[in-house]
Amino acid sequence: MGDGYKGQLGLLLLCLLLAGCVAVPRARQAGYAELATWLEANALPGETVAVQEPRGWARLTGLPLVELPAGGDAFALLARLQEAPPDYCVVLRSVAWEGVQASPWFRERYRQVAVAAAVDDPFAPLTLYRYVPSPFDGGETLSLNLTLQDTAVGHVTLEAVRLSSQRLALGEPVYVSLMLSGDVREPLHAEWQLRALADGRVWLRDARTLSADAWPTQGTVTERTVVAPPDALPPGEYALELAFSRPNLAPFGSAQGALVAMLSRPPDVSREPLAPDHPLEIAVGDAITLAGYDAPERIAPGDTLRVALTWQVQGTVGGNFKVFVHLFAPDGTLAAQSDAIPVYWTYPTTAWQPGETIRDVHIIPLDAELPRGDYRVLAGMYDPVTGARLPLRDAEGTPLADDAVPLFILRVR
């Protein structure tokens, strides 16, 4: 058999292989249809599905599709998933997907929910995974681009950091993901610390060792830590720092550590304005304004929802009122609630003074069996003796229905 014939045959096989990827085999199409039926019964409107073969999903489901790279590279698949994790992904049996499924990132975030075995298909079974949020995925990513150099060991560059929050609140850990790149020839000792700017006191330390083999030739490695504010942490500004040292404890780069982020612990009661993540302007009775709130947009069943309301006091509050934060299911039933005296039952409205700003946190545990869905979160104030709610008006002076503020839609997933 001549070399020219072999080349033509190889080209023909390649074309057939590519054609098989475009025109989805009938056996696999049946598997896709089975998974689409599962999604129709279990997925929520608007949830996304990631697939490598979008033609296999044509007209099977009305859910938005995320197209994944069709090549055989696990790194490319992971990179696409990490950009914006889809709610579901369809996994074909392949070497690339075996690499993805073995990765710690994927194992932490995706759970198998359905399997469709297609007969006579080498890519079977088709497996459907659902995304489970990681607390390290939330928040904002900040660019750093800071390089630490050691002539004897190498260099480390702090590329960026993702923080679940830049606010320190009691009972609310801050999840930190630091993206690093570099070239080091020894293991490094890494120590995180939370330092108060007012007096330099270090409130938290977290140390670990980074292996010299952990640094990829391309891309980044992620170093994570959890900052859990101690109960005695006073209000103020704090520096989150990371210092490296060599196995002989000699400093690597700066002995003082590199500044990774600035965090703040807001006071519960302040004479200075506070800036909530979601500002509002709701008049509550004649002397109070609801100026905004802080809360997550997504949470898992069984987790604890924390909603921080920001109140501003314009005059004398003529009563001892409770604050309510209610969570309503898609069918309108009350799913969870908090009814409490403000500031963890410690600062009743009879003690509020004109000119004060109050940060009032409400802690609402969610049932582990709470159905997935979009829940409405509403808030307001009422007289606990009579049950009468304080009247609410928006910025234009329009009364709010049921004297309750519709704060936001919470995605329970």
Image (tube, rainbow, N blue to C red):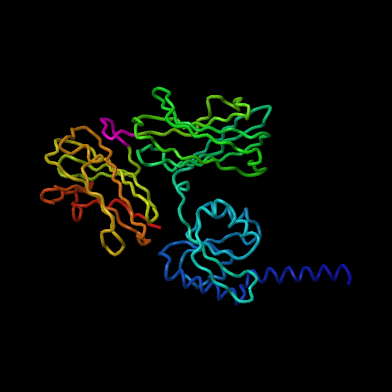
Residue 365: % across, % down:
32, 51
Q: Is residue 218 above or below residue 36?
A: above
Position of residue 91 in the picture relative to residue 401 (left or right): right
Quarter-wise, where is residue 172 in the image?
top left
Q: Is residue 120 left or right of residue 239?
A: right
Residue 1 or residue 345, whichever sits in front: 345
59 to 301, vertically: above or below = below
Q: Is residue 43 inside the magenta stretch? A: no
Residue at 34%, 30% in the rendered image: 234
Foreground residue among 86 and 321: 321
Quarter of the image with the N terminus in it: bottom right
270 in relation to 47, above or below: above
How many numbered tags mark residues here?
0
Drawn side of residue 227 relative to residue 382, left or right? right
Query: Where, by quadrant of the figure, is residue 202 drawn?
Result: top left
Majority secondary structure of the magenta segment? loop
Most extreme residue toward the front is 248
Residue 233, located in which quarter of the rendered image? top left
Residue closest to the far top:
199
Percent across and percent down for residue 255 are: 56, 24
Is residue 314 found left or right of 54 in the rendered image?
left
Quadrant where the image shows the C terminus? bottom left
- Residue 227, percent from left and from top: 44, 38
Foreground residue among 368 and 383: 368
* Span shown in magenta: 266-274
Give x and y (percent) for residue 36.
Answer: 49, 71
